[in-house]
């Protein structure tokens, strides 16, 4: 199991993940009015985007795709029985189920003037930005994926959560071996990813 105790990959590029939702909701029942989500935010795309936690290991392995989840919206407006209809990867499947399970408040479907149960499908896309994929590929090329390296931002060793937007990244370079240990100590035994910013290190979150 990889050690993600302080996982700076997400620190560098978290703000640039693209969750490319289309309004991809399908109602499988013959109804006069389809169910409507009532959560906050009420737009399903924005709701999923707000609460999505892209699995860290899936990021590292550059796993992407659309997970299709089906569920029942009851006549009382509650979501029940979510299940995977189209799988991508167990990591993404699990997160998609968690997200959909949060969507509990619905305006139920109507048929012939009354509220009825309706089966609904929702596509949950998981997409990484080009910057993220390039960064993870850099770690792969440098042999740093299995044992996480030390991260240094603007000459400071970072162990807290710091978000560095891509526009603030001036350069990223990798140091390995005895040279890295000599400069940064034994914590650098798995290599060092050195980030230099353009506008200074953002505050710790």
Image (tube, rainbow, N blue to C red):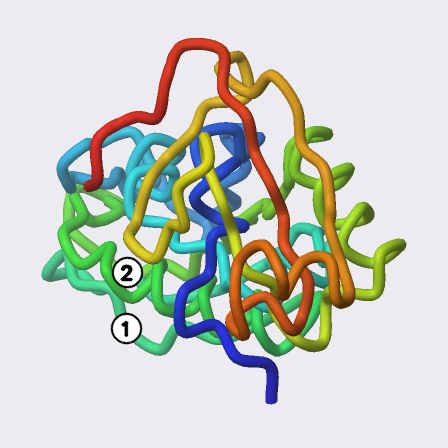
In front: 91, or 67? 91
The answer to whether the residues at label 2 and label 1 have Cβ atoms under 8 Å apart is yes
Task: Quarter of the image for the C terminus: give it.
Answer: top left
Q: Residues within 10 Å of mark 1 (few under 14, many from 20)?
A: some
Q: Position of residue 154 (x, y in %)?
A: 45, 30
Q: Which residue is mark 2?
A: 73
Does 36 sit left or right of 28 as displayed? Answer: left
Residue 148: tell me if it is visible: yes
Q: Residue at x 51, y 71 (%)?
A: 187
Residue drawn where x is 28% and y is 62% of the image = 117
Rendered view: 154 above or below 63:
above
Label 2 residue SS: strand
Give above or below for 189 relative to 14: below
User: Picture coordinates of residue 159 (x, y %)?
Assistant: 34, 57
Q: Position of residue 113 (x, y in %)?
A: 16, 41
Q: Position of residue 23 (x, y in %)?
A: 50, 30
Q: Quadrant of residue 149?
A: bottom right
Closer to us: 35 or 133? 133
Q: Is residue 142 left or right of residue 39?
A: right
Question: Residue at 35% of width from left, 26% of height from top?
Answer: 201
């Amino acid at each position: 199991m990889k050690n993600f105790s302080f996982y700076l990959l997400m620190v560098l590029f978290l703000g640039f993940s693209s969750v490319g939702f289309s309004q991809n909701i399908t109602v499988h029942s013959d109804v006069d009015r389809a169910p409507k989500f009532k959560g906050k935010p009420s737009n399903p795309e924005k709701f999923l985007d707000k609460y999505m936690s892209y699995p860290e290991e899936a990021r590292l392995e550059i796993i992407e795709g659309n997970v299709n989840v089906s569920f029942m919206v009851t006549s009382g407006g509650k979501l029940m029985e979510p299940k995977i209809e189209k799988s991508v990867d167990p990591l993404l499947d699990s997160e998609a189920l968690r997200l959909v399970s949060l969507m509990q408040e619905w305006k139920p479907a109507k048929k012939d003037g009354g509220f009825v149960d309706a089966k609904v499908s929702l596509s949950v896309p998981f997409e990484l930005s080009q910057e993220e994929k390039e960064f993870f590929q850099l770690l792969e090329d440098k042999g740093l994926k299995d044992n996480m390296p030390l991260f240094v931002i603007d000459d400071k060793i970072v162990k807290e959560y710091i978000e560095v937007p891509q526009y603030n990244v001036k350069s990223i370079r990798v140091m390995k071996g005895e040279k890295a240990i000599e400069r940064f100590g034994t914590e650098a035994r798995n290599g060092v990813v050195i980030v230099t910013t353009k506008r200074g290190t953002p505050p710790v979150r």
